[in-house]
Amino acid sequence: MKKYIPSILLFCLFEIIAVSLTLAKGNLFYFLNFTYIGGCIAAGLALFARGKRYARRFVQFAVGTYMLVYLGFICRENMQIEGFWYYLFLGVFEAAVIHYAVAKILGPLIFGRGWCGYACWTAMVLDFLPYKRPERHGRRLGFIRYIAFALSFALVAGLFLMKAADLEKVMFWLFIGGNLLYYTAGIVLAYVFRDNRAFCKYVCPVTVFLKPMSYYSMLRVHCDEGKCIRCGKCLNACPMEVEVNRESRNRENATECILCYECVKACPVKALR
C-alpha cells in the first residue's frame, strides 16, 4: 500500500477543496467537479505506481477532454487565461478564477507544473505529435510568453473599457478562437523546432503563473547523485530539457518540469524518484 500513498493524499487534497468550495458556494457542481478531477489524477498516480506506461496519458485525456469539451463547449465557460481576467474584472470568484487559483497559482506549490503534464488540453493534443524529444532549441524565445500574457490581459481589459455588448457570448467565442490559435501555434512550433513542447516552453501565457510557484513545489523529481552514473539518458528523455541529474532546485530549467517521469523510466540505476 505504501506506493499508493501519494495518490491517496492527492485525492484527499482534492476532496478537501471539493467540500470547502461546495459549502462556501452552496453549489454541488464544485464537489462533483473536483472529485472527478482528483479521482482521475489519483487513479493516474496509482497506475504509474503499478508501472503502467499509459498512466499519464490516461489522466491527460480524462481531465483535458473534460475541461475542453464539458466545461468549455457544453457549459460555455472560457477556461483559458482570458476567462480568468474576465471573472477578475467582474469581481466574481467563479469558474476560471477558481480553476486558476487551484491549478495554476497556488496548486504549483504542491504539484509544480503537473497541470502541464496531466491536464492541459492543448498539450494533450501536442503530445501526439512525433517529436517526443527536443531536436532543436529556441530558449531565447521565452520572452514571447510574457507578451502573450500581457496581450491576453489587454484584450479583456479593452473589452470592459469599451463596454462591449454581450460579453459572455464574446468570451465563449474567444475560448473557441483561443483554442484554435493555441493548437495552430503549437503544431507549427512543434514542426519548426522538432519539439512537441515548444509552445509550452516559449509561448504559453499560463506559464507566467506556473513557473514562479513551481520552484518551491513539494512534489518534484529527486536525484540521488551518489547513485547517478552520468549516462545522460534522463536528459535525453526529458521533453522539457530539465537538468534532472542534479538534486538542487537551482538546476537548469528546473521550473519547466511537468512531472511526466520520463526521466525516471529512462534511468538505468534508479537514481531518480
Image: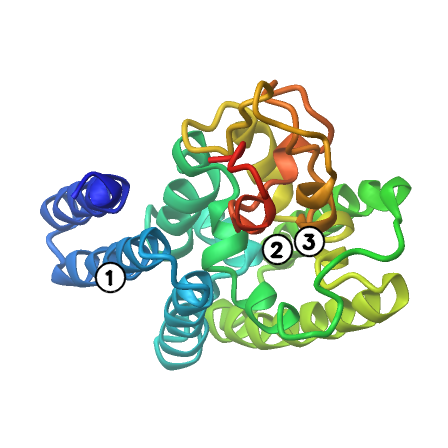
Residue position marked by numbered label 3 in the rendering = 200
Q: Nearer the viewer, residue 36 or 161?
A: 36
Marks 1/3: CA–CA distance: 25 Å
Looking at the picture, the colour scheme in use is rainbow
**Dot 3: element:** helix
Q: Which residue is drawn at 29% across and 59% down?
A: 37
**Which callout, 1 or 3, points at the residue further toward the start of the chain?**
1
Q: Which of 101 and 227 is in front in this view?
A: 227
Q: Which residue is drawn at 38% across and 57% down?
A: 51
Tell me the kind of residue under disc 3.
Cys
Q: Could you tell me if the residues under marks 2 and 1 are in contact, i.e. CB atoms within 8 Å? A: no
Tell me the kind of residue under disc 2.
Val
Residue 80 visible to the viewer: yes
Q: Could you tell me if the residues under marks 1 and 3 are in contact, i.e. CB atoms within 8 Å? A: no
Image location (x, y in percent) of residue 187: 76, 72
Residue 91 visible to the viewer: no
How many numbered circles are shown? 3
Q: Which residue is drawn at 60% across and 71% down?
A: 174
**Dot 2: element:** helix
Residue position marked by numbered label 2 in the rendering = 156
Task: State the mark number for residue 81.
Answer: none
Tell me the kind of residue under disc 1.
Asn
**Which callout, 3 or 2, points at the residue further toward the start of the chain?**
2
Residue position marked by numbered label 1 in the rendering = 33
Frontmost of labels 1 and 3 is 3
Height in image: 96 above or below 76? Answer: above
Q: Nearer the viewer, residue 20 or 84?
A: 20
Mark 1 closeness class: few <14, some 14–19, many ≥20 residues within 10 Å: some
**Dot 1: element:** helix
